[in-house]
């Protein structure tokens, strides 16, 4: 028999196929693992200009650049700044994770949302800005506390508080047209490296403090100054850094649970001028992970416990916020909006000062309806105010429509200037 006359038997073929199948499986897993390691490393890799690989991915879609340009266009019009929330009173609600929306700050202010919470991160070697996002691996240089919040607030307040001929500013106005004395709360959730983050934040707040835009407390004179913006820190708070400020421009969101457990110890740790609010999760206060998940909302026992905590905070003049609220009921109750409204109603009836929300439009509709119902039960004087607010909602829609052409014209003008600039550049290169 010749060397190549060997004929494969069925068993040999089966064995070869089996080996080939195992090889393919191993190769597939190896490829997936290698891809995961490469992309994972790229996502976590950071430099001074690019905190993560994801920023390149975001930039390639161009959505954020368009967003920032649109914000600039909107805030280049004095009438837009004044009409942003005309007819809407400041609502006692905190919008969190709003940076997931297209235009987070303006959307919240447009509805009169009184507070916004921001997850802020410090990146090593970057001392001029803080990065915004839920998780560190998802951070991008196109979503920073300046680009999404502070920069826009600065422009907005500059327009609302023009200087007189002598350089002075009259009565300071906040971002709420119908309630200009109401301060807007920027709640910063410190995610890492609190002392370095606080240092970078202070650098960015200097211009606000020079213009008297910030609420401050002078620890020497023991005097408050209530500005149009109030900065509150939560999470991994740089407690000593805030406490050691002579003139505080940031305040601690105190732990509600500690206040309830030991009021004297709390008062010693959080003296006058250090905190304006106290908050706690629904779980840590009620002790139940399933608190509020029932279709009927919070139980009578849970409501009683919450009421005790809230009353204790109110005795010290602190505003209360309950966080990490359930967003839907049981599997058999798919109407999550009705469920959220039931929880919100129960908390407001307990005199919770600020609602913790993610669905800002739903919360706005709910609070307008809730205030209307409350006005009906309390008397016609308040009812007239609420009705006026509803009527002005329709006026606002007309105002926005009247400005739509103006905004579109500004956008076209901006695009034309870009085209002309590019043409000049090309002509120069040809020459």
Image (spheres, rainbow, N blue to C red):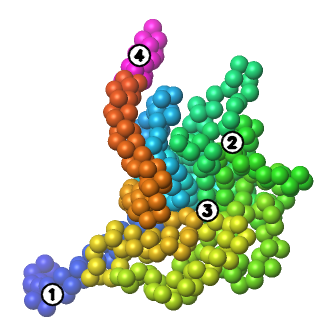
Query: Looking at the rendered structure, which numbered label has been put on residue 14?
Result: 1
Residue with the mark numbered 3: 189
Q: Residues within 10 Å of mark 3 (few under 14, many from 20)?
A: many
Image depth: mark 3 or mark 2 in front? 2
Q: Secondary structure at mark 4?
A: helix
Q: Quadrant of residue 46?
A: bottom right
Coordinates of residue 24 in the picture (x, y in percent): 27, 75
Image depth: mark 3 or mark 4 in front? 3
Residues at marks 3 and 4 touching, judged by CB atoms closer than 8 Å: no
User: Residue drawn at (83%, 74%), measured in percent from left and top?
Assistant: 268
Residue with the mark numbered 4: 420
Q: Residues within 10 Å of mark 1 (few under 14, many from 20)?
A: few
Coordinates of residue 295 in the picture (x, y in percent): 35, 82
Give the magenta range.
Answer: 412-431
How many angstroms separate mark 3 from mark 4 (CA)?
43 Å
Residue 281 horizontal side relative to residue 425, left or right: right
Residues at marks 2 and 4 touching, judged by CB atoms closer than 8 Å: no
Residues at marks 1 and 4 touching, judged by CB atoms closer than 8 Å: no
Q: Residue 170 in magenta?
A: no
Q: Nearer the viewer, residue 139 or 237?
A: 237
Residues at marks 3 and 1 touching, judged by CB atoms closer than 8 Å: no
Residue with the mark numbered 2: 213
Q: Secondary structure at mark 1?
A: helix
Q: Residue 427 in magenta?
A: yes
């Amino acid at each position: 028999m010749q060397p190549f006359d060997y004929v494969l038997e069925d068993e040999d073929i089966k064995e070869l196929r089996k080996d080939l199948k195992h090889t393919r499986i191993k190769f597939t897993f190896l490829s997936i693992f290698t891809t995961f390691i490469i992309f994972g490393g790229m996502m976590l890799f950071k430099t001074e200009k690019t905190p993560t690989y994801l920023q390149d991915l975001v930039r390639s879609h161009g959505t954020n650049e368009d967003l920032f340009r649109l914000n600039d266009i909107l805030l280049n019009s004095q009438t837009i700044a004044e009409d942003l929330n005309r007819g809407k009173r400041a609502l006692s609600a905190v919008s969190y994770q709003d940076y997931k929306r297209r235009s987070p700050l303006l959307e919240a202010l447009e509805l009169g949302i009184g507070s916004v919470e921001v997850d802020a991160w410090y990146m090593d070697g970057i001392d001029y800005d803080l990065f915004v996002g839920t998780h560190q691996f998802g951070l991008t240089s196109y979503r920073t506390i300046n680009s999404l919040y502070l920069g826009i607030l600065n422009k907005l307040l500059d327009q609302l508080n023009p200087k007189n001929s002598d350089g002075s500013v009259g009565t300071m106005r906040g971002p709420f047209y119908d309630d200009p004395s109401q301060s807007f709360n920027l709640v910063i959730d410190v995610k890492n490296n609190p002392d370095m983050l606080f240092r970078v934040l202070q650098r960015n707040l200097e211009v606000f403090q020079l213009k008297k835009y910030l609420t401050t407390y002078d620890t020497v004179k023991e005097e408050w100054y209530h500005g149009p913006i109030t900065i509150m820190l939560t999470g991994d708070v740089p407690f000593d850094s805030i406490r050691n400020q002579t003139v505080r421009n940031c305040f601690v969101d105190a732990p509600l649970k500690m206040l309830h457990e030991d009021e004297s110890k709390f008062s010693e740790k959080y003296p006058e001028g250090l905190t304006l609010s106290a908050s706690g999760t629904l779980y840590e206060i009620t002790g139940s992970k399933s608190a509020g998940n029932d279709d009927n909302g919070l139980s009578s026992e849970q409501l009683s416990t919450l009421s005790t905590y809230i009353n204790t905070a109110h005795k010290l003049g602190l505003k209360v916020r309950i966080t990490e609220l359930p967003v839907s009921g049981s599997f058999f109750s798919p109407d999550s909006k009705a469920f959220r409204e039931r929880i919100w109603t129960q908390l407001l009836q307990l005199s919770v000062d600020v609602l913790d929300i993610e669905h800002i439009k739903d919360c706005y509709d709910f609070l307008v309806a809730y205030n209307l119902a409350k006005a009906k039960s309390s008397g016609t004087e308040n009812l007239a105010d609420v009705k006026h607010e509803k009527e002005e909602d329709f006026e606002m829609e007309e105002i926005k429509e009247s400005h739509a052409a103006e905004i579109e014209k500004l956008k076209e003008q901006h695009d034309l200037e870009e085209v002309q600039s590019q043409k000049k550049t090309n002509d120069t290169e040809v020459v």
